[in-house]
Image (cartoon, rainbow, N blue to C red):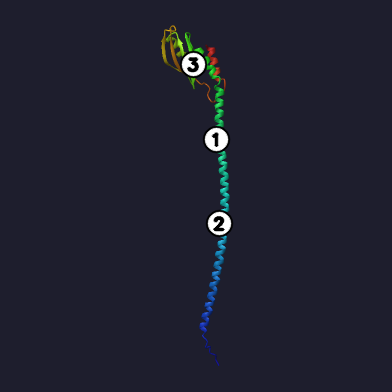
C-alpha cells in the first residue's frame, strides 16, 4: 500500500535552503574579514617598512648636506688661502720695484731740477720740485716717457719764483709701471733695468 507524506515538505526544504544560505553568507563574511585583516596587516607592514626607508633616506640626506656644507666651507677656505697666497707672492715679486723706481727717478731728473717732495698713492706718484726753467721740466717729462718704470707724465702747475732765486716750482704726476706679471718669475724687471743701465 503506498504511503502518502502529508507533512509540509516544501516548507522544510525552504528552511534548509535558508539555513544553508545563512551559513554560506556567514562563511563568506568571515572569509572577507580575514582577507581584509590580512590585507590590513600586509599594507601596514609595507607602510612601516617604507617609512623606515624614508627615515633612513632623510638621515642620509642630512649627512650628505653636512658633507656638502663642509666641502663648501673647505672650498671657501681654499679660495681665501689662494687669494692670500697670490697677494703674498705679488708683494714678494713687487718688493724690488720700489727700489728700481727710485733709482729710475734719480736717472730721469735732468740737471737743474730738484725734487722737494715725492708722494705715492697706489701706482701714482706726485712729484713736487724746483726747476731752473720750464725747459728743464719738459726734459724731466721726456725722460719719464722713455723710462722703464714710469709713464704718463702729467704736469699740473708751474709757478715762477723770484723771492728764492730764479726758477719754477712745479707739480707733476706719473704712473708707476709694474713689469712683474702674475706668471713671471722674480728678477725679470731687474734684468731689463740692468740692461737699460748698461745701454746708458
- Residue under the image location 56 percent in, 34 percent down: 77
Front-most of residues 131 and 91: 131
Q: Secondary structure at mark 1?
A: helix
Q: Earlier in the sequence, mark 1 or mark 3?
A: 1
Image quadrant of residue 163?
top left
Q: Position of residue 32 (x, y in %)?
A: 54, 67
188 relative position to 168: left or right? right
Residues under labels 2 and 3: Cα distance? Answer: 82 Å
Residues under labels 1 and 2: Cα distance? Answer: 42 Å
Q: Secondary structure at mark 2?
A: helix
Q: Quadrant of the N terminus?
A: bottom right
Identify the mark at residue 11; answer none if there is no mark.
none
Q: Are marks 2 and 3 in contact (CB under 8 Å)?
A: no
Residues under labels 1 and 3: Cα distance? Answer: 40 Å
**Above or below 27: residue 4:** below
Q: Secondary structure at mark 3?
A: strand
**Above or below 85: residue 8:** below
* Mark 1 or mark 3, whichever is nearer to me: 3
Q: Which residue is mark 3?
A: 118
* Mark 2 or mark 3, whichever is nearer to me: 3
- Residue under the image location 55 percent in, 43 percent down: 65
Q: Which residue is mark 2?
A: 47
Q: Earlier in the sequence, mark 1 or mark 2?
A: 2
User: Label 2 neighbourhood size at 10 Å, few (<14), some (14-19), many (20+)?
Assistant: few
Amino acid at each position: 500500500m503506498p504511503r502518502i507524506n502529508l507533512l509540509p515538505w516544501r516548507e522544510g526544504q525552504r528552511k534548509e535552503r535558508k539555513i544553508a544560505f545563512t551559513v554560506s553568507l556567514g562563511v563568506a563574511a568571515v572569509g572577507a574579514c580575514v582577507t581584509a585583516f590580512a590585507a590590513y596587516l600586509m599594507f601596514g607592514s609595507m607602510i612601516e617598512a617604507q617609512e623606515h626607508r624614508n627615515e633612513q633616506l632623510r638621515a642620509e640626506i642630512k649627512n650628505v648636506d653636512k658633507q656638502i656644507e663642509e666641502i663648501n666651507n673647505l672650498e671657501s677656505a681654499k679660495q681665501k688661502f689662494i687669494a692670500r697666497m697670490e697677494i703674498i707672492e705679488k708683494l714678494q715679486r713687487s718688493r724690488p720695484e720700489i727700489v728700481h723706481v727710485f733709482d729710475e727717478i734719480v736717472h730721469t731728473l735732468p740737471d737743474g731740477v730738484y725734487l722737494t717732495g715725492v708722494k705715492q698713492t697706489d701706482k701714482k706718484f706726485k712729484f713736487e720740485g724746483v726747476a731752473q726753467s720750464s725747459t728743464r721740466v719738459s726734459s724731466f717729462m721726456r725722460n719719464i716717457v722713455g723710462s722703464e718704470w714710469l709713464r704718463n707724465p702729467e704736469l699740473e702747475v708751474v709757478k715762477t719764483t723770484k723771492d728764492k732765486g730764479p726758477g719754477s716750482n712745479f707739480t707733476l704726476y706719473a704712473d708707476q709701471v709694474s713689469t712683474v706679471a702674475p706668471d713671471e718669475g722674480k728678477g725679470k724687471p731687474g734684468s731689463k733695468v740692468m740692461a737699460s743701465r748698461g745701454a746708458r
